[in-house]
Amino acid sequence: MSAIFTRTSVRSYEDKEVEAEKVEQLLRAAMAAPSAGNQQPWEFYVVTDKSKLEKLSKCSMYAGCAKDAPLAIVNCYRKEIKMPEYAEIDLSASTQNLLLEATELGLGAVWLGIAPHKGRMEAVREILEIPEELEVFAVIPCGYPQKTAKQQDRYEEARIHYVK
């Protein structure tokens, strides 16, 4: 699982299309995530339309990198599920899987937080015409990274507490 220790947030991409089979592999990884009660609440929008990517880049002050990405994956969750209070947790696990798989495939991606900010969620809904029965969770620009960076070591022994 070297991807865990090499994954970084990538915000600049080569002008190169991501192959369909790699996009499918990203989505397969996202859907392999655990979910509460196995409810699998996720739905995914794969955005490659440049005008939509431009609009998504303005949905948050942190989303500017979306305009130059070859694609963005917008993950959403269904409102009508048996345990809606766990939906955002489920989507977090799904998003992490996608980010790790991107690293494994030689791609770069970044998790742009949309939920729980209602204004951002509504902006993305309007741009992509997402139906009301879904809630927008995140925008994940993805592509071949222009440069690679080394992940910082975040291990801090002082934050570990053993209970015996």
Image: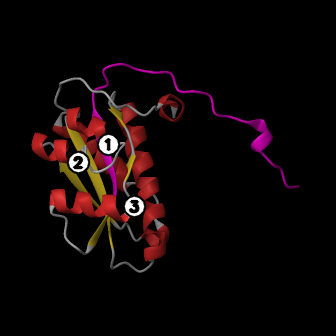
Residue matched to label 3: 117
Q: Against 37, is 124 above or below?
A: above
Residue matched to label 1: 63
Judging from the image, what secondary structure is the residue with disc 2 in?
helix
Q: Residues within 10 Å of mark 1 (few under 14, many from 20)?
A: many
Q: Residues within 10 Å of mark 3 (few under 14, many from 20)?
A: few
What amino acid type is highlighted by mark number 3?
His
Q: Are marks 1 and 2 in contact (CB under 8 Å)?
A: yes
Q: What's the magenta region?
A: 137-164
Q: Which mark is residue 56?
A: 2
Q: Against 114, is 78 above or below?
A: below
Judging from the image, what secondary structure is the residue with disc 3 in?
loop
Residue shown at the point (17%, 42%) measured from the top left: 54
Lateral position of residue 147 relative to residue 70, left or right: right
Residue 126, position in %: x, y?
18, 62
Residue 129, position in %: x, y?
15, 63
What amino acid type is highlighted by mark number 1?
Ala
Mark 1 → mark 2, Cα distance in angstroms: 7 Å
Q: Are marks 3 and 1 in contact (CB under 8 Å)?
A: no
Residue shown at the point (37%, 31%) measured from the top left: 10
